[in-house]
Image (spheres, rainbow, N blue to C red):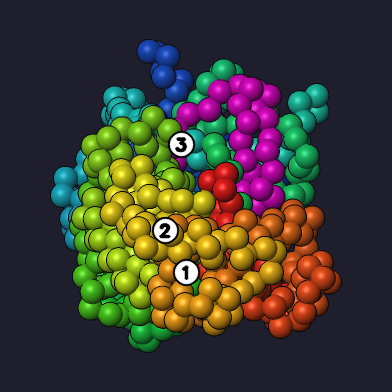
Amino acid sequence: MIIATAGHVDHGKTALLQALTGVDADRLPEEKRRGMTIDLGYAYWPQPDGRVVGFIDVPGHEKFLANMLAGIGGIHHALLVVACDDGVMPQTREHLQLLSLAGQPPLSVALTKADRVDAVRIAEVQHQVAELTQQLGWLAVPQFVTSSTTQQGIDALRQHLGQLCAPAIDTHRRFRLAIDRAFTLKGSGLVVTGTALSGEVSVGDTLWLSSLNRPVRVRSLHAQNQSVTRAQAGERIALNIVGDVEKDQIARGDWLLAQPQPSGTLRLIVALRLLQPLRNPSQPVHIHHAASHVTGRLNLIAGELAELVLNEPLWVAENDRLIIRDSNAQLTLGGGRVLLLNSKKRGKRHPDYLGWLQQLVAAEADEESLQAHLAQQPVDMAELSWARQLSDDALTNLLDKVAPVRLGSAIMAAEQANDWQQRLLAALTAFHQQHPEVPGIGRDRLRRVALPHQPPEQVIALIDRLLSQGQLQHRQGWLHLPDFEPRFNPQEETLWQQVGPLFSDQPLWVRDIALATQQDEETIRSLLLTAARLGHITAIVRDRYYRSDQIQIFADLIRQRDANGGSTSAADFRNQLGTGRKIAVQILEFFDRSGFTRRRGNDHLLRDARLFDTRT
């Protein structure tokens, strides 16, 4: 159970915590000297049943609001402190607004310094506070009249707070801890502390430090100020970590993550909740997330939808809450709930895209969110598990419920998979009609013909799925439809017995074969088209053919050069073949057209190694 204080400066938050727990949460010398909380303080309160309630004491002065915001992420309850002599003050209101924007945790109110005023004043302040909390969404908030000096009301408040119960922890999420302090202890080494937002961690686990993308090992743990072997979300945790990292390399706002995430998010879509209308639809802002604080630009898209373009990455997840302040860090503009981690650069205001974003606004649960994402595009499973912070078991359970089509590392809605399959089959049908002289088409070329703007890995995986279903077949790497079965008729069979032996290791033209066999060119052309579809010969240009095994030799040369880290040029190929430059150029251009290679300047790089290979 974690409770954060809130309230205006000098309203007695720290003194109240000391009266409740016996702990002075002000730990810095300057705080002692000035009598004012500057940074986050912590106090722990053991309960008779073995539980430990943790308190986060936040600074009340407006100059230290960034520190206050670093302390309210992942809390279970808030304790608003209002001095009876001052009543509601600017930071009273602002702290409540920030708590509301950060997720509106349950709230209790302590009216302090009651020994300084009379009953009439106490009643006035009680009314002020009740009116304010109701305005900001807390309909029924218990109030306790207290004095840290005389101990008035302390027992009643202590009894109330001791009976609070933390919500159940969702164990299906990955461990994620926002670091707010780092220090070294003699004999132990590096220690970091923070509030775990999700998941659980045990001694011996390996975690990833976000800022350095390096692994660290958990040597020992303290949760709620007690030595433990396992800790979980909703606890204040201190982790003694070992690894290739020093204290000076860790800053407030870094994360310890269960699994590596090399880069954070720089462009994201949020659902805004504004405290007041924005002066400009695009403006620089300060963004606070858990213990992190970065700057960026807010761009309104439509209604409550906005894009945040960040100057530094944030390791956010979907549904995370952000606090947004103006460019001077003086005024809180509002908050945002993260909808999409990586927004596209163009087309965000297209009606279809806006409609999809509205679906994401309404989809807070995992299953609803996944269905909304699949309605727009295929989803990478690694990106999904990060965005929703799902453990492996939770991801498996979610996929079992939604039942998408799995394509390698991605998933796709069944309706979209069927649409893409039909496009692939239609494109191959058209290819057979337009190019009857070839036995089929390569995987990558079919992808570029049918679905040129879709992710290559997913299209290739869908092609493999069609192969496994028998809707496509392949021969030597060439894809073809199942009913595409060329064969010689009896007359062609007889003629091929005469023509086939003419092919050696050099290419032949249709006209030369017609002349040699005393046949007309159309007869020979038709014969060679069928022979090409049967895989006996291959046309490098119209009417010029090589034996297919010779083409495979050429392809193996390119595969060999690629395996050695090289590309192929016409000059290199001519020298290797010992042939003329024109033929070398024709062969390489044929390989480019087939999708076996791709051209980059004068070089030809391997694209689809499975083509021209009798082993496939």
The foreground one among 412 and 315 is 412
User: Above or below — where is 41 with respect to 412?
Assistant: above
Is disc 1 surrounded by few (<14), some (14 to 19) or many (20+) residues within 10 Å? many
Q: In the image, residue 411 lies at what x, y percent?
A: 35, 48
Bounds of the magenta span? 194-221
Q: Give the mark toward the camera: 3 or 1.
A: 1
Q: Amino acid at mark 2?
A: Glu
Which is in the foreground here, disc 1 or disc 2?
2
- The residue lying furthest to the bottom in this view is 280
Q: Secondary structure under badge 2?
A: helix
Report x, y in % for residue 240: 68, 29
Picture coordinates of residue 212 (x, y %)? Answer: 69, 50
Tell me if I can see residue 488 in this picture. Answer: yes
321 shown above or below 75: below
Specify the label residue 174 is tagged with: 3
Cα distance in 3D space between marks 1 and 2: 11 Å
Residue 117 got which mark?
A: none
